[in-house]
Image (spheres, rainbow, N blue to C red):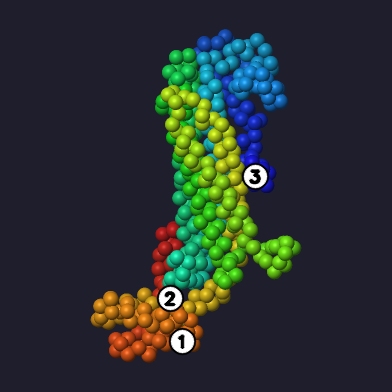
Amino acid sequence: MIPRYSRPEMAKIWELENKFNIWLEIEMLAAEKMEDIGLIPEGAGKNIRAHGNFSVDRIHQIEKEVKHDVIAFLTSVAEHVGEDSRFIHQGMTSSDVIDTAFGVQLKQSADILIKDLDGLINALKQRAQEHKNTICIGRSHGIHAEPTTFGLKLAGHYAAFKRAKERMIQARDEIAICAMSGAVGTYATLDPRIEEHVAKELGLKQETVSTQIIPRDRHAMYFATLGVIASSIENLAVEIRHLQRTEIREAEEYFSEGQKGSSAMPHKRNPILTENLTGLARNIRSSVTPALENVALWHERDISHSSTERLIAPNSCITLDFALSRLTDVVKNLVIYPERMKKNLDSMGGLVFSQRTLLALTQAGISREKAYRIVQRNAMKVWNCDAAKSLKMYLKEDEEVMELLDEDDLKAIFDYKFYTKNIDFIFERTFG
């Protein structure tokens, strides 16, 4: 990943130094257990632990010749360990090391992403409660529908990211797997106690049936989870972008002193962060299909998944970490305009009360079809931009309406408080 969209803690997980350190730890743990159960000479495991080391540059140098990264790694380690290096990797395959280490890296990444989600969830909770009763228009199909509150909008996104956290925890648990079963997964050359020991020390679970590799349905689930989280990021980002449109201007990204919105137009304040998040979400989701396609491998194993995972794993994890952090900052600093929300709410002359009127007429004794026809013919006069009159005014002039409803009925119908009466109930259910 490019530095522009990387944060140091997550990026470090995917550096070669970290990967080879995990490889080395796996080899040392395995050697120590082999010594413990008498498979290699006494003291060999301890010596491997004491002198085990590697050089990334040397690994690259060796790999140019041998064309195999694990062999290049083992050769570099052997140069540090000396004679006892012959006991390293005893009965193991490359996958025993690579797949187990990959699980560790994905688990480490998941730990960071879960913390990121906690930060975003807390920010959304705070802003939702702050604007719990800030009334605004709800839109369906991009068109004014009925009143809601801005806090309720944010509460919906809060709930989505709570679900995202639960999925991320499940994905972490499913990918935190150790598989050290030797060629084609039979344990013929590798005692199962070695896998048990390595798994315990690394905080992993043992694979049920590894077939030499960890089954890729686990990885598919992991990357699909990242993709769903990315879609939730985009969902909120798009909402903010819409609300920042000039014609709406109900909320906008914080615009700092000295910031420039356009190289050509000095007046511009563009939603650049949420547009950026939309693009990053697309990038993260692009990893899902390759991960799904990696599930179908030849027989007990092949490496068609390998090149894909070398690309999608660091890219997806690093990008999602950055995106969650950026979105958290956007939410914390979001500028909200309640007055503008109220102005937009009132801008359609009370059309938002059409359903209330429809229901009142049906309760007064006429059919739904007739009530709908009466309300719609009055509403369309307002819709057609007759700014001189509101829906309430037209209803007062409609004889069919006034035969069924009186002034007090209309006053009750055209009351915004009706739409916020259950907000406390929803918030209690959402935030407890």
Amino acid type at circle 3 is: Ser
Q: Which residue extends farthest right?
A: 258
Q: Position of residue 318 (x, y in %)?
A: 60, 42
Decide which of 143, 195 is in the foreground and name it: 143
Q: Residues within 10 Å of mark 3 (few under 14, many from 20)?
A: some
| Residue corresponding to mark 3 | 6
Q: CA distance from mark 3 to mark 2?
A: 45 Å
Decide which of 375, 208 is in the foreground and name it: 375
| Residue corresponding to mark 1 | 389
Amino acid type at circle 1 is: Lys
Label 3, secondary structure: give it: loop
Do residues under tags 2 and 1 come within 8 Å of each other at their CB atoms? no
Label 1, secondary structure: give it: loop
Q: CA distance from mark 1 to mark 3?
A: 55 Å
Residue under the image location 45 percent in, 65 percent down: 141
Q: Earlier in the sequence, mark 2 or mark 1?
A: 2
| Residue corresponding to mark 2 | 352
377 relative to 260 in the view: left or right? left
Q: Quadrant of residue 428?
A: bottom left
In the image, is residue 74 above or below residue 274? above
Q: CA distance from mark 2 to mark 1?
A: 15 Å
Decide which of 405, 192 is in the foreground and name it: 405
- Quadrant housing the C terminus: bottom left
Q: Position of residue 19 (x, y in %)?
A: 61, 30
Which numbered mark, 2 or 1, is in the foreground of this view?
Answer: 1
Residue under the image location 51 percent in, 56 percent down: 235
Q: Residues within 10 Å of mark 2 (few under 14, many from 20)?
A: many
Residue under the image location 63 percent in, 18 percent down: 66
Residue under the image location 46 percent in, 87 percent down: 389
